Amino acid sequence: MGKLIFYIVDVFAEEKYAGNQLAVVRDATALSDSQMQKITKEMNYSETTFIMSEEPREGGYDVRIFTPAAEVPFAGHPTLGTAFVIRQEIVKQPIETINLNLKVGQIPVTFEREKNRNELLWMKQIEPVFGQNIEAGVIAQILGLERSEIDERFPIEEVSTGLPHIIVPLKNLDAVGRSIIAKDKYFKLVNDRWAKAILIFCPQTSCRENALRVRVFGDYYGVPEDPATGSGNGCLAGYLVKHRYFGTSKIDIRVEQGHEIGRPSLLYLRAEEKSDHIDVSVGGKVIMIAEGKLF
């Protein structure tokens, strides 16, 4: 295999060792699928990405994303983290946009400087697609909650902006905190269903500047709980706009995730319903942690 350079970055993190850590392997063209899957398991992060070429093709860089269990067509924090690495370590110029060619299609990532000099990365996700609704009592049993703790003003719905999630509105922070997956019931539900991951949320937060508290469970992908989920929050953004959760067809909010597992993360969501579609963007900060070599 030779020596392969890899980087560890923190995505959706306000400081080092929060957020969602990611391994990015550089110039992975010579690796087989089985080698990439093995490296991902050894890295033991929720995802590892592989930059397949250091030269752009059709305006973007070819990238593949693996979880410890399987390759996935799209995931949020790997998209932002990989774009950050490409700009900093390969392009080495402060360009405004990096395009990634993923299984789901080409995803643009833009770099935006805030007034306080912090830099946010934003990914424009594909248009949300909405699937089936799920009965509240079924989800309550999976989460170990009472049905009354689910906010039934809004549906439990499958949504995808590249990776489908089941979006579950809960009433309060206590319900979010007490949720725990009954794995037998969970796998029975998702094995034959389009969406495999479950995203739960509520309007109570630990910081008043944040609009929602989120948790994401993805045992199907080998990730029992994710500290920060760009793909899931992109699904959530489309859902919030479609169902007018905040009473408006446009949102620009901050979402907190990962507090329950000691990895507090912060994600930025923008979405707007147009005449025939919904635009969704997910943003956050990326911090370089380490560089190493694989032998």
Image (cartoon, rainbow, N blue to C red):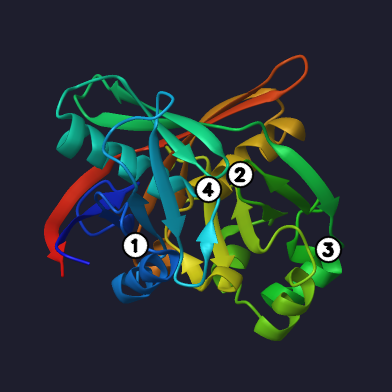
Please report whichever mark, 3 or 2, sits nearer to the chain's N-terminal start: 3
- The image shows residue 97 at horizontal and vertical percentages of 34, 22
The disc placed on residue 135 is: none
Q: Residues within 10 Å of mark 1 (few under 14, many from 20)?
A: some
Q: Residue at x 31, y 22 (%)?
A: 112
Circle 4/circle 2 CB separation < 8 Å? yes
Q: Residue at x 21, y 45 (%)?
A: 287
Mark closer to the observer (4, 3): 4
How far apart, in angstroms, are the residues tagged by discs 1 and 3? 29 Å
> Mark 4 = which residue?
74
Q: Type of residue at label 2?
A: Gly
Q: Quadrant of the N terminus?
A: bottom left
Q: Residue at x 61, y 53 (%)?
A: 201
> Mark 2 = which residue?
162
Q: Type of residue at label 4?
A: Phe
| For residue 95, above or below residue 222 | above
State left or right for residue 7 relative to residue 218: left
How far apart, in angstroms, are the residues tagged by discs 3 and 2? 24 Å
How far apart, in angstroms, are the residues tagged by discs 2 and 1? 24 Å
> Mark 3 = which residue?
136
Dot 2 falls on a residue whose secondary structure is loop
> Mark 1 = which residue?
263
Q: Residue at x 52, y 67 (%)?
A: 70
